[in-house]
Amino acid sequence: MTIQRIGIMTGGGDCPGLNPVIRGAVLKARALGWQILGIEDATSGLIDLDYRSPKGNRWLGPDDVRGIISKGGTILGTSNKSDPFHYVVEENGIKKESDVSDRVVANYHKLKLDGLISIGGDGSMRIAQKLIDKGMNIIGVPKTIDHDLGSTDYTFGFNTAVQTATDAIDRLHDTAESHDRVMVVELMGRNAGWITLHAALAGAAHVCLIPELPYRLEPILERINERRARGNPYSLIAIAEGARPAAGDQSHEGPKALGQMQRLFGAGYKLAAALEPRLDMEVRVTVLGHLQRGGTPTQFDRILGTRFGSAAVEAARTGHWNHMVALRTPEIVLVPISEAIADPHNVSPSDSMVRAARDVGITFGDE
């Protein structure tokens, strides 16, 4: 197959390292003499070729990616509302979800693309696999701060998010100790607690609550009171947004919106409301939220992103369509996208990092 032009897009939530991937792919593609089209706002630019935002579908060259390796976000824009199999359309004044994937395939051919690089997490890879089943040539690049995509040692964006979360915990230690308070910091992580686990271990939190291990209040109260009895009248709790009590559910912000995942909201405040009446201490909550998605990528994510971008183009050159690039330290390898989405990468209760955290006194609330 002779390749002349490929597309590249970023889907799902933004994260540090997207721009290094784009840069790596563009420079490699142009060195091969290919044209590379930046697709606007995930699949939005393929659902509607007349879709317009300040970014826009555009052919990319070295000048377009100059200086972007250190920038967070994505120069192509992204969206978590453009799943073509569940796209929100309006008919007769009523909004509903509709399957517009045939339009994506038609526009892919109309643009005369030989293939597409899809940069995204678990949801984006599932969409990519469905489009592959409809005949599109796709190379996947694993992106997620949650680190919940299988078949790769690391996803880019995770390292930077953990650093941001760790910095926040370091700062909250200071104010918690100054005021003898319990500080609860809520971090991202819908179903996977990797950010919270890594940041709790790196930031020396006293309690770590993650989605994979539903918590009870009693072990948490015991840990806080034990610290007070030993002359440490403050505690730091790291909680993932998807954490839930053993006898309850995750905390959501209202009903699920059309074309979107149900939003998580309030895990930290829910915990604080349950703890404070049972403690003679103030409990304060900090929600780090989208701060974890922004900012300058760490050197690890810059290097991994660049390697992934270059490797994705090389996979296209060698005809390995329908695969995802993955890190199997120290090498970049290819795995079928179907394999990458088969099993989510969640924290196991027997994981060595969980054991290490317990060894240094971190409570998970499941004891």
Image (cartoon, rainbow, N blue to C red):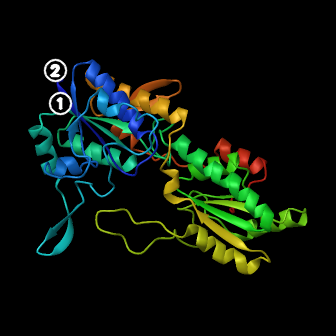
Dot 2 corresponds to which residue? Answer: 2
| Residue visible at 17% across and 30% down in the picture | 114
- SS class, disc 1: loop
Q: Does the rendering let one see residue 191?
A: no
Q: Does the rendering let one see residue 352?
A: yes
Residue that sits furthest to the bottom in the current view: 277
Q: Which numbered circle lies on residue 203? A: none
Question: Residue 365 or 76: which is nearer the viewer?
Answer: 76
| Residue visible at 57% across and 53% down in the picture | 193
Q: Position of residue 316 (x, y in %)?
A: 27, 26
User: In the visual, does 145 lie left or right of 314?
Assistant: right
Q: Position of residue 251 (x, y in %)?
A: 51, 70
Per the model, the C-alpha gap separating discs 1 and 2 is 8 Å
Residue type, numbered disc 2: Thr
Q: Which numbered circle lies on residue 114? A: 1
Q: Position of residue 117 (x, y in %)?
A: 29, 35
Query: Where, quadrant-wise, is the C terminus in this rendering?
Result: bottom right
User: In the visual, does 340 lie left or right of 95?
Assistant: right
- SS class, disc 2: loop
Question: Residue 177 or 356: which is nearer the viewer?
Answer: 177
> Pointer 1 and pointer 2: residues touching (CB < 8 Å)?
yes
| Residue visible at 11% across and 34% down in the picture | 112
Q: Quadrant of residue 334?
A: top left
| Residue visible at 15% across and 40% down in the picture | 108
Q: Position of residue 228 (x, y in %)?
A: 86, 66
Question: Residue 54 or 255: which is nearer the viewer?
Answer: 54
